[in-house]
Amino acid sequence: MSKELIRLRDVCMAFDDELVLDHLNLYFNDKEFLTLLGPSGCGKTTTLRIIGGFATPTSGDVLFDGVRINDVPPYKRQINTVFQKYALFPHLNVFENIAFGLRMQKRPDPSDPTGKRMVKIPEEEIRERVMEMLEVISLKGFEHRKPDALSGGQQQRVAIARALVNRPKVLLLDEPLAALDLKLRKDMQIELKRIQQQVGITFIYVTHDQEEALTMSDTIVVMDKGTIQQIGTPEDIYNEPKNAFVADFIGESNIIDGVMLRDKCVKMYGREFPCLDGGFAENEPVDVVIRPEDIDIVPVEQGQLVGTVTNVTFKGMQYDIIVDFKGFKWLIQTTDHSPVGSRIGIKIDPDGIHIMKKSQYSGMFGDYSSFSEEYDELDDASLAPDEEESGDEE
Amino acid sequence: MKNKLSRLTIPYVIWMALFVVAPIIMVVIYAFSSADGGFTLSNFAKMGTYAVVFTRSFKLALIATAICLLIGYPVSYIMSKEGPRFQRIAMVLIMLPMWMNFLLRTYSWMSILENNGLLNQLFQKIGLIALYNNVFGTDLQFFRMINTQGAVVLGMVYNYLPFMILPIYSVIVKLDNSLIEAARDLGANSVNVFRRVILPLSLPGVLSGITMVFVPSVSTFAISKMLGGGTELLLGDLIEQQFLGGAYNPQLGAAISLVMMIIVVVCMWVMNRFGEGEEQAVMM
């Protein structure tokens, strides 16, 4: 696709005795939108800070265009950052905030033939470039406002403009939407993707929000405990998770113990299910991932498996139902209502079954037993006052 | 609800009226009164003779404030960059002298600066005075330190320095580190980070530090009395003399107080106007 821009080679990071990044190897392509995704403490922000120059790795190399930049301070890198809490300068107005980076810059004087004399960027050019950025972020006319007179979304966009006006090769974004409300967050996701395509540079985005990652990214890097769990396109990550951690972190998953009898045939609950995966040893124990939306509810006699509905939650677009299959609870998303206590059969198409090798995460995720108990408790709590009310009526 | 809460302020309002507003009104009335109680402007006319005291007071207070700022800002800045343990210890050390009586502190400076005080004895022992006499061909027994303007300024700086450090420190220590990182990220080197971000954002602390040092310095009387030996008469001494001293004239004392208060208020107002934009900045 496009050429490699940044490479992390064998990067380790330790705070005190705690290893935060464990021999990380990762490269970033030019002009791509890459997301570092993982739970808090997985090392994603540390990775970003190393690229930005705010942290120096304990060992390993950071290469930019093939040159080692471990010891290059942040202000000399062609990288800019959008900070989590925006970090706009409160004493400067929008215009001066965006112009800040340009005012710091010096470049060779074009009128000096030796090219050694450095001059500041002329005021007209600063003005032009800031106005251009205000256009990109659709905040024209706001240049004299102080940051505290802007809404969260507007502050966010100013922070992005302030970084982009310097024409960096890479923009780092550290959970930039975390402080926004849901609606605004969705709008900003689209906005960010549009800006990235418009300016055509690499965005490295850090988030713990899987939906954000799936919406915007060209490439997703899933991290946990300082190591990379999987790298791939959003479709790859969702459809072909490498282990139980990834399957559980990205979307909802039922993860069941199975045995791979042979290629394209897996055994669960003592039954054989046709699937599309292969390349495992004969009778190899595996983790089977079934996404809740890939399960069809059928009459009991036609079902590959038969279970009892223990919980139903209305979610607007669909019902989330919890079904007990021999003590292991599954989450099924369906548009059909099945009452609690009813016996239902289910059918899974071969392409709805994804097989993963056993990993350190096996058995930790994918069971909705605790989930349904939580729901039971919540239901009880919400039912109690209702019952009282109806009692009063009588 | 709101009414109930506002009722709680009544004692405070009474307190303020009794002990702040009423005295100020009395000062104003006295300032415009003659000894027999009639209206007069002569108190202000008399003040011309004391112009030299006014200038001296403001000059010394300004010098002391400037020195406090020069010492206080770097100290606050360095302190805020250190670990929490260092900050706690430094804070205690800065506050420690303030837990001692003000007069006692100043008195101890007297015994340090006296003609045969601690410092002069030390200078004698290490031969500094003899060396000075050799070099400049003088015949000094001691350095004259006490009863000089320098001693008065020293007393002011010593006593009021914490009032400069504390507000500046509390502003700098609260500065969001991500602002500094953002500035570095946008290409600012250390000098520019300080000049463009830290300094403007710490201005409100500087302004309140200046106020808190300048106002007591300009009106002090104990320091000048003890370290200036009465020769360096300041406004505070002048006012004290009118009320307690031999030159008993409370009407004149009130007039001087009033003029001093007006000058100080005007100074503060001008300074706060100057720092208004930054004041908002720190509110965030």
Image (cartoon, grey):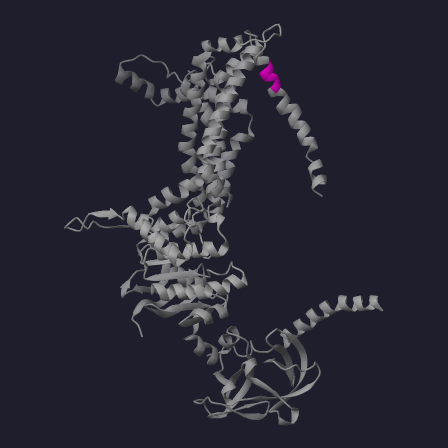
- Residue extending farthest left: A113
| Magenta stretch: helix, strand or loop mostly | helix
Residue at 38% in and 59% down: A136
Figure quadrant of residue A57: bottom left
Q: Position of residue A244 (x, y in %)?
A: 51, 78
Residue at 57% in and 84% down: A295
- Residue extending farthest top: B36
Q: Is residue B79 left or right of residue A256?
A: left
Figure quadrant of residue A385: bottom right
Q: Position of residue B51 (x, y in %)?
A: 44, 13
Q: Quarter of the image for the N terminus of chain B: give it.
A: top right
- Residue extending farthest front: A141
Front one among A75 and A245:
A75
Q: Position of residue A280 (x, y in %)?
A: 45, 89
Figure quadrant of residue B118: top left
Residue at 29% in and 46% down: A123
Is residue B108 among the parts visible in the rendering?
no
Above or below, A35 relative to A359: above
Residue A93 among magenta residues: no
- Give the mark count: 0
Front one among B103 and A290:
A290
Is residue A102 among the parts visible in the rendering?
yes
Q: Position of residue B145 (x, y in %)?
A: 40, 18
Front one among B255 and B128:
B255
Residue numbers of the magenta segment: B25-29
